[in-house]
Amino acid sequence: MLELKGLYKTFNAGTVNEKRAINGLNLTLEDGDFVTIIGGNGAGKSTMLNLISGVFPADAGTITLKGVNLTNLPEHKRAKYLGRVFQDPMMGTAATMGIEENLALANRRGQSRGLGRGIHAQERALYREQLATLGLGLEDRMTSKVGLLSGGQRQALTLLMATLKKPDLLLLDEHTAALDPKTADKVLQLTEEIVARDKLTTLMVTHNMKNAIQYGNRLIMMDAGRVVVDIRGEEKKNLTVRDLLEKFNIENDRMLLSE
């Protein structure tokens, strides 16, 4: 489903602030893989997601998704293949627009825009049905401005928007890190349900090691811009936080704070 081959990315090249963020990265995902990604600050986790989504170009290497070479495509042309949820709940929605208007924007991602009616009755019924699956009562507030929602409600809506068109690849960049623990658990539960229901191939960056172990069928660790650990199957199912800390000698990493 996804192949990253020989990716490199350096920021501020040739200056005193030069930083090689991605260093010969290779990674292959099978259709339906739900991969959690851990690693210290500066390991290259978010940079990898930004390269996949086209926020900035790779210096070298290729990005192939479902047989399509995305490497040189601009960000807006990759949108029809990808869904993404950011750490900041404010980034994935338009605060001054209503809930149903935000969903309509997501539903039209990758399509040409015309001068037809805004939202049809059948379309509105679909949004109501999808919102009801969140269990947050948003289906009864469809005309409410998104800016009035709580952070958790907004992030749940962003998750729904990112998966409404069933993307080929879902990118989750620490999407619960800014939420309180109870709300984060709810959003993660919704994430797991949506990914399983739609069989979405998913990359989820997290600093919480328990979540990295609990969710998904595969766990990778990144360090210095490349994958250094890849655990799956029975080994992942039997993994504990202590095993991870001891096995990979990361006691001093910030991840320990999220144990």
Image (cartoon, rainbow, N blue to C red):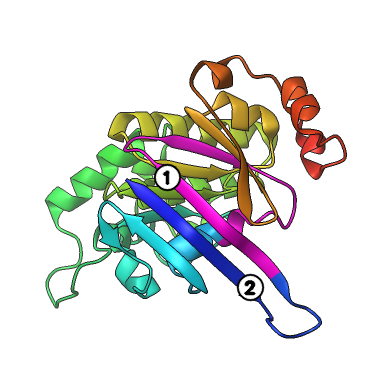
x, y percent for residue 55: 49, 71
x, y percent for residue 52: 45, 61
User: Which quadrant, please, contains the N terminus?
Assistant: top left
In the image, farthest residue toward the bottom: 15
* Relative horizontal placement of residue 51, taking residue 97 as reference (left or right): right
Q: Which residue does the numbered mark 1 point to in the structure image? A: 28
The one nearer the camera, 227 or 165, is 227
Secondary-structure class at tag 2? strand
Residue 215's place in the image compared with 175, above or below, is: above
Q: Crowding near pointer 2: few (<14 within 10 Å), some, many (20+)?
A: some
x, y percent for residue 59: 52, 74
The one nearer the camera, 71 or 184, is 71
x, y percent for residue 77: 30, 71
Q: Which residue does the numbered mark 2 point to in the structure image? A: 10
Disc 1 marks a residue whose amino acid type is Thr
* Relative horizontal placement of residue 161, taking residue 49 as reference (left or right): left
What are the residue bounds of the magenta stretch? 20-47
* Residue occupying image coordinates x 78% and y 78%: 17
Q: Crowding near pointer 1: few (<14 within 10 Å), some, many (20+)?
A: few
The one nearer the camera, 182 or 140, is 182
* Residue occupying image coordinates x 14% and y 78%: 115
Residue 133's place in the image compared with 237, above or below, is: below
Asked whether residue 93 is in view, the answer is no
